[in-house]
Image: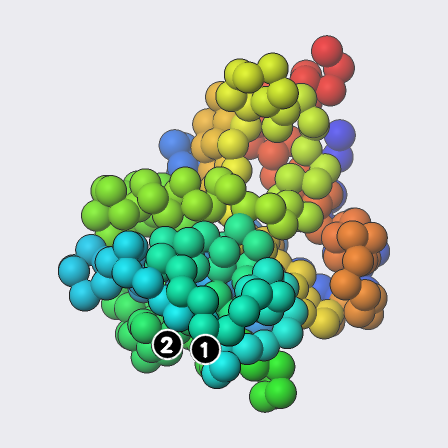
Amino acid sequence: MLPLQESLNQLAKDFSGHFALYAEHLETGETISFGVPHPMETASTIKLPILIATMKKVQDGSLSLDQPVTLLQEDQVSGSGVLQNLTLGIALPLADVLMLMIIVSDNMATNMVLRLVGLQTVNQLMASLGAKDTVIKKAIDFSLPPPIGLSTPQDLVHLLKGIYRRELVSKEASEWMWDVLTRQQYNTILTRRLPYALLDSDDDQPPLVVIGSKSGSVEGVRNDAGIVQTPWGDYAIAIMSEGCQDLRFHIDNEAHRLLPLAARAVLEHFAPQALATEES
């Protein structure tokens, strides 16, 4: 096993674009920082700040998770999700719309939520929470020029820590968000190269490692940010990339092959005991 810095340097050398990584052990406070920190295209990781802003409104009573949200023509957009295949005019509880926005990164669900919450509300909350480089620029609309939003790995970890510590919104709202994040179905970076035995729960026992995360992809960009809970200590991690020359939306996209190795290197550094699961 190579030392962490050497592993990350080699991955950066092999990658056609460039990536930045930030991670923090949530018990010891040890941090890992790699790459030049500057605001980068969020792609769908901006849905994490949208989720937080929505739950803030749920907490103050201006929104309810039970209230119906109607799918309108103005919400229509291509890309990830399932609502584009359903009937305009259907109404779903806000809780279900948020679930779709996170676990299958549904773009139309995102636009439905933004109609309720507003871009400025999200941006003002991010500034007040100390995520100074995080801003949403537009609703999901690929006819408009990028970016969808901007952030840094440091900001994403800061927000995730707030959810983990139940500090951003109420304890109940924070726990609801955490549950949603753990249901993530786009597990292409943080989990892809982790030992299967860590994530396996086929025997009805909870997995050793639980990850709550939000990923994001647009052409040339692959991002992932989440909390990794392990028996050897929990940590937050965010990886953001840009400039990748492989523009395919495919599981074997270059970023989807290399960046999971960076996530694994962080696990090996924070929890070297995890490697024993591959040998047993």
Quadrant assignment for the N terminus: top right
In the picture provided, is 60 more to the left or to the right than 206?
left
What's the residue at 81%, 65% (across, down)? 248
- In the image, 73 versus 12, the foreground residue is 73
Whole-percent x and y of residue 237? Answer: 52, 47
> Is there CB contact under 8 Å for labels 2 and 1?
yes
| Residue 65 position by quadrant | bottom left
Question: Mark 2: few, some, or many residues within 10 Å (few <14, many ≥20)?
Answer: few
Q: Residue 72 carries which label?
A: 1
Q: Which of marks 2 and 1 is in front?
A: 1
Question: Mark 1: few, some, or many residues within 10 Å (few <14, many ≥20)?
Answer: some
Whole-percent x and y of residue 271? Answer: 57, 27
> From this viewpoint, which residue is outermost toward the bottom?
144
What's the residue at 54%, 69% (across, down)? 87
In the picture provided, is 74 more to the left or to the right than 191?
left
What's the residue at 40%, 60% (across, down)? 92
- In the image, 133 versus 196, the foreground residue is 196
| Residue 171 position by quadrant | top left
What's the residue at 72%, 37% (across, down)? 193
Q: In the rendered view, would you say 95 is above or below 46?
A: above
What residue is shown with label 2?
115
**Number of numbered markers:** 2
Residue 120 visible in the current orientation: yes
| Residue 262 position by quadrant | top right
Residue 152 visible in the current orientation: no
In the picture provided, is 188 more to the left or to the right than 25?
right
Q: Which mark is residue 63?
A: none
* Amino acid type assigned to the residue bearing label 2 in the image: Arg
Quadrant assignment for the C terminus: top right
Asked which secondary structure carries label 1, the reply is loop
* Amino acid type assigned to the residue bearing label 1 in the image: Leu
